[in-house]
Image (cartoon, grey):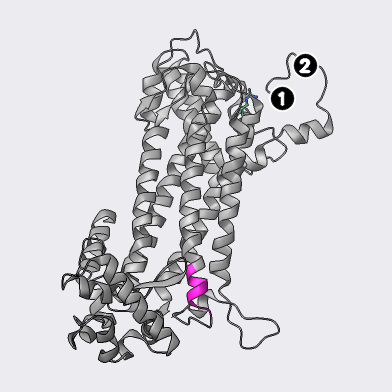
Amino acid sequence: MKLWSGMLSGDLDKFAEEFNSSIKIDQRLVFDDIKGSIAHVKMLKKTKILAADEADQIIDGLHTIGQKLIDEKLTIDLTSEDIHTFVEASLIEEIGDLGKKMHTARSRNDQVTTDLKLNLRDESEEIVDLLKKYINALCEQAKKNTQTIMPGYTHLQAAQPVTFAHHLMAYAMMGLRDLDRLKDFQKRINESPLGACALAGTTYPIDREFTASELGFESIMQNSMDAVSDRDYILELQSVLSIIAIHLSRLSEELIIWSSQPYHFLKIDDKFSTGSSIMPQKKNPDMAELIRSKSAKLIGNMNQSFVMMKGLPLAYSKDMQEDKESIFDSIDTIKISLEVMTGQISTLTANKEKMLKACKNGFLNATDVADYLVNKGVSFRDAHHISARLVKYGMENDKSLDEIDLEIYKKESDLFETDIYEEIDIIKCVNKRTSLGGPAKDEVERQINFVLDKIS
Ligand code: ARG
């Protein structure tokens, strides 16, 4: 029997029944629903809306249902309309008709958004922990590579030398912002909608502050229509998770490029690689590729949530039942992506020789040639031209800047002396970039400590 069957005649059409049911998706809210219901009934007792002994029996019944589910003595009936219906029906089964009093001064409209908020608050805390582990893995790998010189790129063209640690720490900084966004989300989700009822509050003398504090909410939503129709928190979480997914996807792309043959900058551990069914030599970065593609799922889910909410009138509409599948999928996807990425980062090995060798070919120290002249009083614009001509000479004669004879340098400017070779030494080029945020060893070590401090 449906909760609402009093006024309607007959059964739902078979397909309509299946179409209407959300239990397969919202069953994962079961413990949140029980928790929310216990808080609600405690409030009914406190305000004397229910007699104390009745409320106690209902609360005991709810605890029993929770325990039976844990002990697998009760399984969720997937023919129920939704999780709220299932819990209420199970309660009535457990304690008899008294269970029918639980829903006094409440509606599924405030109930469902309360459950969802409780659930997403917990999930976001788990994601915070996973993010911290991922950021920590980046820092630990960076610690091992503060002197691992590699080309830094712009336009994917070799630009200036950096270190592998410097590059990894860029991702750690993105992770810190992601953490910050999650914390911000956690602040706003933490307002209780419970007691808004269907949309217009209630005539019963409820105590919304009491249920809010029972459920660990920091405050209560101030307008009952807003309380039942707000899904901003889903849109926010979808956005935050999509940004995390994009960061992981960018890092994946780099792992894929860096582990490919022309680069050979790093080796992804075999635990995170697969072979080919036909080509014996192949070692494929499947995990990185999958993380890269999972970001599409998150962005798709985010899009679904936004489009679903766009243009919905106040207050509750059944459209909102469709808020769960996509946010649960985004949560599950980002959790496993973070786990896999953390493992990959912790176990990869940098090929220091290859990275250094790649710095020799790309004229990465051309800026340093210009800076050398600037230090001798030449304007940067003129120095840039002189350096560019030397690069052109190097390209035409297949020589790197440190292989070009001093006499060629002197033809371009008589300010060049033998110390130019020392100035354009690739390792020196990195370690003299001591400006805040730069790649010099001490500076990157400062960045690592900065991040470790933030996540501790
Ligand atoms: N299963 C519904 C949902 O997820 C619960 C709320 C139902 N409310 C209603 N007025 N039909 O949105």
Whether ligand 1 has any atom under 8 Å from the Cβ at mark 2 is answered as no
Q: Position of residue 297 (x, y in %)?
A: 60, 52
> Farthest residue toward the left?
376
- Badge 2 marks a residue whose secondary structure is loop
The residue that appears at 59% across and 45% down in the rendered structure is 301
User: In front here: 246 or 376?
Assistant: 376
For residue 142, what is the image quadrant?
bottom left
The residue that appears at 31% across and 66% down in the rendered structure is 139
Q: Position of residue 409 (x, y in %)?
A: 27, 85
Q: Name the dominant secondary structure of the magenta segment.
A: helix
Please identify, in this view, whether the residue under mark 1 or under mark 2 is nearer the observer.
Answer: 2
**Which amino acid type is marked by label 2?**
Leu
Q: Residues within 10 Å of mark 2 (few under 14, many from 20)?
A: few
**Which amino acid type is marked by label 1?**
Lys
User: In front here: 360 or 150?
Assistant: 360
Q: CA distance from mark 1 to mark 2?
A: 10 Å
Horizontal side of 5 relative to 348 (left or right) equals right
> Across the whole image, how many numbered discs are drawn on residues?
2
Mark 1 in CB contact with mark 2 (< 8 angstroms): yes
Q: Position of residue 374 (x, y in %)?
A: 20, 70
Q: Quadrant of ligand 1?
A: top right
Does residue 250 appear anywhere in the picture? yes
Q: Which residues are magenta?
A: 254-260
Against 34, residue 413 (above or below) is below
Q: Residues within 10 Å of mark 1 (few under 14, many from 20)?
A: few
Q: Which mark is residue 8?
A: 2
- Badge 1 marks a residue whose secondary structure is loop
Q: Which residue is mark 1?
A: 2
- Between discs 1 and 2, the one toward the N terminus: 1
Does residue 90 appear anywhere in the picture? no
